[in-house]
Image (cartoon, helix red, strand yellow):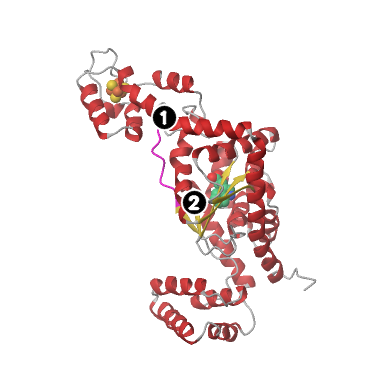
Amino acid sequence: MNSIANPKPRVLSGMRSSGQLHLGHYHGVLKNWIRLQHEYQCFFFVADWHALTTEYENPDIIANSVWDMVIDWLATGVDPASATLFIQSHVPEHAELHLLLSMITPLGWLERVPTYKDQQEKLREKDLSTYGFLGYPLLQSADVLIYKASLVPVGEDQVPHIELTREIARRFNHLYGREKDFAERAEAAAKKMGGKNAKLYQALRKQYQEQGDHEALVVARTLLEEQQNLSLMDRERLLGYLEGGGRIILPEPQALLTPASKMPGLDGQKMSKSYGNTISLREDPAAVERKLRTMPTDPARVRRTDAGNPDKCPVWQLHEVYSSDDVKQWVQQGCRSAGIGCIECKQPVIDAVLVEQAPMRERAAEFVANPDAVRKIVLEGAEVARAVARETLTEVRQVMGLNYFS
Ligand code: TRP
Ligand code: SF4
């Protein structure tokens, strides 16, 4: 697939490598990716450098978790035929862009990112007063901007990082997108679209600038996307001219908020490794059964003959994820009247989790048995990613005065 010529909006997201994924990741992030991969041009990568910012003392856990993570993605249905999958450190262009962006990033912007202090507090056992950790969100900005991604699926906690990315892009464009005779060059570029399109562009620009009509802005951007005979430079000029600034070399991305996962853990809190309440994606069936059978229920339901209340029971939350209306009705009725026992009540959940995991376990086993296939997928992914990343970097080097031989 030629991703440079692909006109679908580009989506990019990364996941820190941090051990095996669990059902919370599946119901939260991965199902979302699997849906997006059919609608957009998707790039998904393992953020191994980001993992190193906090795990620099245990590098051995990173290598293993990278492979586990890629296998988990593939096992759940993230499809290398639809999305580009790769490992961050295989695309060193991210690092160069990070370095170049660091030149224009005020320290205060990084110090003010809320996750900086939060994570330092939370991970007190680690020394995170490092240069790399402060730069974590800037590396993330480079991850996004190097692909000129329009949409970045992330959870709520990551939104400030996307905000920072937008500010960095704006600052970059402001510093390096200004050129002499900008307006004249933009006007000349508009003419290259041909009379009809040029006229439409000018009308939309006026509508946006004079009336703040956002719809016009969106239509004009699409119009520019569709122009085959514009050079990259001219397209950037026209994008910038629309909004009144200079060339837009690094477009501002938008966060695509991942709906909070409703997946509860075994104790009713959100499923999370740090709470020790997870079922991993590839958990062995016997362990799944044991974990679910022994999970807590409504604490007021001590004896089988006591009536219970599903609202106070973590098993009910699992029924909300997995069960049909009929089963849910059976639970509500049976629990409140002491008509069913808790083990009986858990059985449909156990069955549903096992059914959900069976194909994942099978596919994961195939990839575990065939590590070369996994390697090939991420190496090919890195090549596709690098072709896009190199283009951006060439432009960035040029506007930053680093093009000595052309
Ligand atoms: N920081 C993100 C997280 O912890 C992972 C990440 C790294 C990322 N680079 C990214 C997410 C780029 C989106 C885009 O979840
Ligand atoms: Fe929970 Fe079901 Fe037992 Fe009611 S019957 S307490 S919902 S496990």
In reply to whether residue 260 is colored magenta, the answer given is yes
Indicate the position of residue 1 as horizontal and vertical percent values: 58, 57
Residue 123's place in the image compared with 293, above or below, is below
Judge from the rendering whether residue 192 lies leftward or rightward of residue 199; answer left or right: right
Quarter holding the C terminus is: bottom right
Query: Residue at position x 46%, y 85% from top?
Result: 196
Residue 315's place in the image compared with 130, above or below, is above
The answer to which of marks 1 and 2 sits earlier in the sequence is 2
Q: Amino acid at mark 2?
A: Gln
Indicate the position of residue 50 as horizontal and vertical percent values: 63, 45
Query: Residue at position x 63%, y 71% from top?
Result: 175
- Which mark, residue 371? none
Indicate the position of residue 77 as horizontal and vertical percent values: 50, 42
In reply to whether residue 191 is colored magenta, the answer given is no
- Which mark, residue 37? 2
The stretch of residues the image draws in magenta is 257-265
Q: Secondary structure at mark 1?
A: helix
Query: Residue at position x 46%, y 30% from top?
Result: 358
- Residue identifier under label 1: 355
**Alpha-carbon span between mark 1 and mark 2:** 24 Å
